[in-house]
């Protein structure tokens, strides 16, 4: 089983393709090679990713940006609005509530939970905040399927457990701690350091290249 | 040029390998196949990624977790502490200042910049905040090479320009807007929606599978 061909690896790449398509003129045509270059893969890989979910474009003629964008959105389930529940309305949680990028992409944090009595019953960035003991009731009533966890590390697992028993199907955990969920729940670890590590690598590598240039 | 073999794609995977190695017992041995499974790639790809930077382990015997972790850290430039400058000390910025995951991985936000007069001259989560006009002076004095931008969209490009003229070599932009930097600066777009898109895909796909099961 090579994961490069797994549906999820393809989904990750589709999400990256989409990011670039969104910035482009809608009525132009793009080749698989051009799209590949944006995310550092091969044209063959792009064509395979798209074939996996059906056939788009005409062989040798490329894809119309608008159509490809619509198709990929559909594959990823982005042709709809997702309601999201957030547990932990502290600094990070409030920042996520105000994050425009979510709403732009169809992700709508509709409800917040926090143990801090001074914000329970209030609205933060327009979103009502409840005590976590109401998680199962509120989430079932509103049929919310996605959750975000932005609580301190020691409360992360408990928050995830509450989401799981409430029927949440996919959870994004921002607490920098290892957590678990049953296999039927998609649990993702938000990764803010990953990109800093790439930046570190990039600076280090550039410095090395410059040294080599000076030597030769 | 297939990007799968490019140094940066490898760096991204190395960062993911590291994430899993950190959770493991240090004195055990791990095979390339086992490491590959964590990130959904192949054992051959893992071996190639590691070969790219030199030879580790003994053929057929796997890698000692502790040694592999140290080697990958060194390749990524993580065997040191990186000082970081942050522009935008609002909700998201303050959340990043308090984010434990950064410090744990050797990323230290040392200085903040913001236009809000009520926080200039103060410390937020222990980090001093200055007016952005001081960016060039302060960053050069402290020889800071990494920057994070967490300002409102309309101020993002200006903040990046200030970092660039100050000699910052790598920038992570959290504003959900397209920005540019010269090619000698590594500019990365923080991507909080990417993981929600994978979650969306995962829910949609699970629903499809269940439907198929009911039909058959």
Image: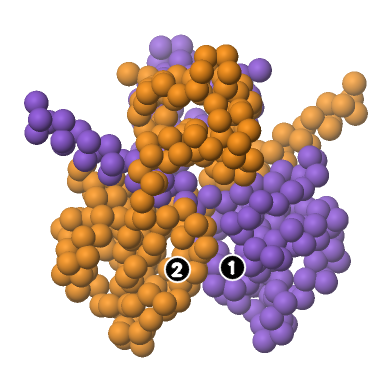
Chain colours: A orange, B purple
Q: On screen, B176 above or below B113?
A: above
x and y percentages locating residue B82 in the rendered image? 66, 52
Q: Position of residue B203 (x, y in %)?
A: 28, 44
> Which mark, by number, is residue A205?
none
How many angstroms separate mark 1 from mark 2 (CA)? 14 Å
Task: Identify whether B195 is placed above or below A61.
Answer: below
**Whole-percent x, y for residue B161 in the image:** 80, 57
Q: Nearer the viewer, residue A143 or B19?
A: A143
Host chain of mark 2: A
Q: Residue at x 54, y 72 (%)?
A: B91
Q: Chain of mark 1?
A: B
Same chain letter for marks 1 and 2: no
Compared with residue A25, is residue B109 higher up or lower down, i.e. above or below?
below
Image quadrant occupied by the C terminus of chain A: top right
Q: How busy is the neighbourhood of tag 2: few (under 14 within 10 Å), some, or many (20 plus)? A: many
The answer to which of A135 and B76 lies nearer the viewer is: A135
Residue at the image position 45 percent from the left and 24 percent from the top = A56
Considering depth in this image, is B196 or B69 the residue closer to the camera? B196
- Helix, strand or loop under label 1: helix
Q: Residue at image x 61%, y 28%?
A: A30
**Residue at left offset 59%, top offset 68%:** B93
**A46 w.r.t. B75: above or below:** above
Label 1: how many Cα within 10 Å (few below 14, some 14–19, many 20+):
many
Q: Residue furthest top?
A: B59
Return the residue nearer the eye: A91 or A215.
A91
User: Hey, which quadrant is residue A142 in on the image?
Assistant: bottom left
Residue that badge 1 annotates = B93
- Indicate the quadrant containing the N terminus of chain A: top left, top right, bottom left or bottom right: top left
The residue singled out by tag 2 in the image is A97
Locate residue A102, reporting x and y percent.
Answer: 47, 58
Q: Is residue B161 visible?
A: yes
């Amino acid at each position: 089983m090579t994961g490069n061909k797994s549906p999820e690896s393809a989904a990750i790449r589709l999400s990256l393709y989409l990011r670039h398509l969104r910035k482009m003129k809608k009525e132009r045509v793009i080749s698989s090679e051009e799209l590949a270059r944006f995310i550092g893969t091969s044209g063959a890989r792009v064509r395979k990713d798209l074939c996996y979910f059906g056939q788009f474009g005409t062989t040798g003629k490329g894809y119309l940006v608008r159509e490809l964008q619509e198709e990929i959105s559909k594959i990823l389930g982005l042709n709809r609005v997702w309601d999201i529940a957030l547990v932990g309305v502290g600094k990070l949680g409030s920042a996520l509530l105000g994050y425009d990028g979510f709403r732009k992409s169809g992700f709508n944090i509709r409800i917040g939970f926090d143990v801090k009595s001074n914000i329970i019953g209030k609205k933060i960035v327009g979103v009502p905040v409840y005590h976590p003991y109401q998680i199962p009731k509120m989430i079932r009533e509103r049929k919310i399927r996605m959750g975000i966890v932005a609580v301190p590390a020691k409360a992360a697992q408990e928050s995830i457990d509450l989401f799981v028993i409430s029927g949440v199907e996919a959870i994004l955990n921002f607490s920098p701690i290892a957590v678990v969920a049953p296999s039927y729940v998609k649990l993702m670890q938000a990764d803010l350091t990953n990109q800093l590590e790439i930046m570190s690598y990039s600076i280090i590598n550039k410095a090395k290249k410059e040294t080599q240039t000076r030597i030769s």
